[in-house]
């Protein structure tokens, strides 16, 4: 027994030396990864949070004294999503910008009243592309050592700012990665947001009319200027959903008229701050509410996914699922995008990825009739 303990300690010491904290686990075999995981006590994966209880899922003051705005400090991470940035700055998410998926689900439910399925759909999708499945942590912005040692490459664990995963081209208030920092708020683009709201929105607000026109413009512009534009699944879905989100979640729930004032938009997008006295949505918002709005803006300016081969040379990609093909996009994420980073996971890594894939599918299937697909087989 003593010999065994000594062996264990020795091997752990060896491992501690061999794997400096925060470095990639690439090159280590499955046993060493598992030992590392055991030693660090990481990768306990809690089940996704339940919906907010009835009676506690309604209209509520969310910019409250318990959740004061505190501007991000120099070591706090913020990224491309104005909602998550804001929630972190109010303490609905860890203020340092590194969070577990369950914290993210809870944070968006509590802070903005995302429905449970909808929250899980966004969070587990993002986590599978951008998080660290071993430590169960994800950065809401740039890649950081704070998410712990990475699984072997080609896993990226890049955080939400990682271009070409969840983050992609044609954002409304961020430039395409080809032009600069794709995660940071861009005032020039925000001026366009204001101009389109003034021209198309009711009383200068960002409403569904303004969304449809701005969203279309934000595709036409990069087609003309970004030689490396990529506008295919899964980015098409997030791009069109995110255009609609502010008309729902950033509008005070007491008014709830889907007309976002520029002042409120400035707060969320630029200041990463809820307006004073802000109330969240009066009821949890799920796909049933969001999907028709996305369809409506798509129908005003339909598009076919594609990529630029040089400026103004948009080559259609008819084989990537269309925006209307939700299950096709789900399958594309699970069978192409995720195996791109985890081509052949083993042991513990495989187990935790599969767990997150199951969480993701639960959310997908809650309001869509999709069939689960299994990139790594059904066995656990
Ligand atoms: C629940 C989990 C969420 C995750 C993981 C997430 C993640 C992201 C990511 C990765 C982006 C960057 C995409 C890009 O523009 O390239 C993004 C953008 C965006 N997100 Fe979120 N998001 C979440 C929830 C929300 C919610 C609740 C809102 C509500 C308003 C929201 C609003 C937006 C908007 C408006 C953008 C686009 C910014 C722009 O185009 O300038 N997100 N989000």
Image (cartoon, rainbow, N blue to C red):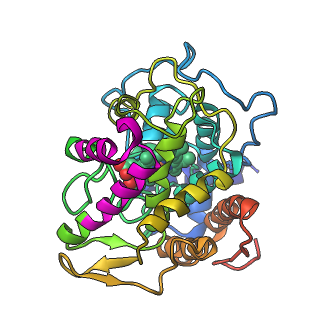
Q: Is residue 277 found left or right of 169 in the rendered image?
A: right
The residue drawn where x is 75% and y is 77% is: 378
Height in image: 80 above or below 319? above
Examine the structure image and report whether residue 208 is included in the region drawn in magenta: yes
- Specify the farthest residue to the bottom: 319
- In terms of depth relative to the viewer, which is nearer, 302 or 344? 302
- In terms of depth relative to the viewer, which is nearer, 303 or 104? 303
- In terms of depth relative to the viewer, which is nearer, 325 or 185? 325
Q: Position of residue 195 (x, y in %)?
A: 26, 44
The residue drawn where x is 70% and y is 61% is: 355
Height in image: 73 above or below 77? above
The residue drawn where x is 52% and y is 23% is: 278
Residue 364 visible here: yes
| Quadrant position of residue 97 | top left
Give the overall secondary structure of the magenta segment.
helix
Instruction: Give the magenta range.
Output: 191-220
């Amino acid at each position: 027994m003593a010999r065994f303990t000594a062996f264990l300690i020795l091997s752990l010491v060896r491992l501690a030396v061999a794997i400096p904290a925060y470095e990639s686990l690439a090159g280590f075999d499955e046993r060493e990864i598992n030992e590392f995981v055991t030693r660090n006590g990481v990768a306990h994966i809690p089940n996704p949070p339940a919906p907010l209880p009835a009676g506690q899922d309604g209209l509520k003051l969310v910019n409250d004294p318990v959740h004061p705005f505190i501007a991000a400090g120099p070591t706090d991470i913020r990224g491309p999503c104005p909602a998550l940035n804001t929630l972190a700055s109010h303490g609905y998410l860890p203020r340092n910008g590194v969070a577990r998926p369950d914290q993210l689900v809870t944070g968006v439910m509590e802070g903005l009243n995302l429905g449970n399925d909808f929250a899980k759909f966004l969070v587990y999708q993002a986590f599978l592309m951008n998080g660290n499945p071993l430590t169960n942590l994800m950065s809401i912005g740039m890649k950081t050592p704070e998410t712990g040692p990475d699984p072997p490459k080609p896993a990226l664990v890049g955080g939400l700012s990682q271009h070409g995963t969840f983050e992609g081209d044609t954002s409304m208030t961020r430039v395409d990665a080809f032009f600069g920092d794709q995660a940071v708020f861009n005032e020039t683009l925000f001026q366009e947001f204001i101009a389109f709201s003034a021209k198309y929105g009711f009383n200068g607000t960002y409403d569904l009319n303004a969304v449809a026109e701005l969203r279309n413009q934000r595709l036409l512009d990069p087609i003309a200027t970004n030689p490396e534009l990529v506008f295919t699944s899964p980015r098409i879905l997030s791009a069109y959903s995110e255009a609609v989100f502010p008309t729902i979640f950033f509008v005070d729930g007491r008014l709830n008229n889907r007309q976002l004032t520029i002042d409120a938009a400035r707060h969320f997008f630029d200041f990463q701050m809820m307006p004073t006295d802000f109330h969240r949505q009066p009821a949890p918002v799920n796909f049933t509410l969001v999907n028709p709005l996305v369809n409506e803006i798509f129908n005003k300016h339909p598009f076919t996914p594609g990529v630029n081969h040089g400026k103004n040379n948009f080559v259609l990609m008819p084989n990537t699922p269309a925006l209307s093909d939700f299950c096709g996009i789900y399958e594309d994420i699970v069978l192409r995008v995720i195996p791109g980073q985890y081509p052949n996971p083993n042991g513990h890594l495989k187990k935790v990825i599969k767990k997150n894939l199951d969480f993701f599918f639960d959310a997908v299937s809650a309001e869509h009739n999709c069939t689960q697909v299994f990139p790594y087989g059904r066995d656990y």
